[in-house]
Image (cartoon, helix red, strand yellow):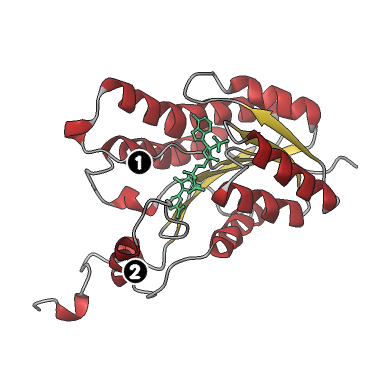
Amino acid sequence: MTAPAALVTGGATRLGRFFVETLAVAGYDIALHYNSSEAPAEEVAVKVRAQGRDCETFQCDFERDDPSALIAEARERFPGLAVLLNSASAYAPAPIAKTDMALLEQQFRVNLFAPFMLIRGFAESVEEGCVVNIIDNKVVRNQYPYAAYLLAKKSLDELTRMAALEFAPKIRVNAIAPGVVLPAETRSSDYLDWRVEGIPAARQGRPEHLGQALLYLLDNPFVCGQTLFVDGGESVNSVGRHSENYPG
Ligand SMILES: NC(=O)c1ccc[n+]([C@@H]2O[C@H](COP(=O)([O-])OP(=O)(O)OC[C@H]3O[C@@H](n4cnc5c(N)ncnc54)[C@H](OP(=O)(O)O)[C@@H]3O)[C@@H](O)[C@H]2O)c1
């Protein structure tokens, strides 16, 4: 029997790598996409193979290339392709006032256009399957310091519901909106303390919390077109930080 396989974008590093390892443990062979992290991608592939699953790496720069061919390549290598996990992301914080055309285009190409074309190609080429888009819990706010990034992620959130409608029942499309899990290495501990103060669950998330959400979305056939916020309630905290001091 053909083993089920998952195409994971941005699977060589950080959360993408964790998703790859989670899916491999769950029994999926892995088509591992990377852009610049060739050596880490190979390292992850070796680890997955050591776990008894098949793994192949695929390079594509979403900023420059049309990613459509990636689906065909992955499908040829893994006929059991059943999952598309859009995790790759470009994160360039800048307010509108500092966003030029090049930055806007880069953020949209990587964070929206690539998942769009991959979903389209995936839906065309598999009999049935699941797409999971990794978004960001900041989509519920209008944090202008991340203008282009956030607008692209907000669109990916909408695309999740739109694609879910277009491709159901053959393909289920869902999303995960992580909160603070693995902050960028440039983030200060002050930033982290500040974020955690506004999280009702009073903690930073762990990659395992996202892994559990991923397997839930893949395994539950009655969940379709949903964005699952895995953020300790940060996105529903409209009162804001220091809520105990809220002037009621
Ligand atoms: N980390 C968090 O706590 C957090 C919070 C909220 C949302 N998220 C979302 O969760 C996902 C994973 O987070 P992360 O922090 O692990 O992401 P990340 O480190 O920012 O980037 C993930 C991957 O994106 C790939 N990538 C970047 N530019 C690319 C391009 N031009 N073409 C193709 N691939 C490109 C990189 O591949 P290479 O290394 O091969 O170049 C990298 O491995 C992202 O969608 C992110 O927005 C994360």
Q: Could you tell me residue 86's position as x and y percent?
A: 55, 39
Q: Residue at x 65, y 34 (%)?
A: 38
Q: Could you tell me residue 127's position as x and y percent?
A: 72, 33
Q: Quadrant of residue 108?
A: top left
Q: Could you tell me residue 57's position as x and y percent?
A: 71, 33
Residue at the extreme left of the image, as rendered: 247
| Amino acid type, residue under disc 2 in the picture | Val
Work out whether 41 lies above or below 121: below
Residue 26 visible (yes or no): no
Mark 1 vs 2: CB contact within 8 A: no
- 1 or 2: tag closer to the N-terminus: 1
| Amino acid type, residue under disc 1 in the picture | Lys
Instruction: List the residue tagged with mark 1.
Output: 154
Instruction: List the residue tagged with mark 2.
Output: 196
Where the C terminus falls, by quadrant? Answer: bottom left
Q: Could you tell me which secondary element the residue under label 2 belongs to?
A: helix
Residue 99 visible (yes or no): yes
Q: Could you tell me which secondary element the residue under label 1 belongs to?
A: helix
Front disc: 1 or 2? 2
Numbered label tally = 2
Q: Could you tell me residue 152's position as x and y percent?
A: 36, 35
Q: Is mark 2 within 8 Å of ligand 1?
A: no
Where the N terminus falls, by quadrant? Answer: top right
Q: Residue at x 24, y 30 (%)?
A: 99
Work out whether 81 lies above or below 227: above
Residue nearest the viewer, comparing 10 with 186: 186
Determine whether, in the image, residue 105 is placed left or right of residue 66.
left
Q: Quadrant of residue 126?
A: top right
Residue at the extreme right of the image, as rendered: 1
Q: Residue at x 42, y 63 (%)?
A: 231
Work out whether 77 lies above or below 28: above
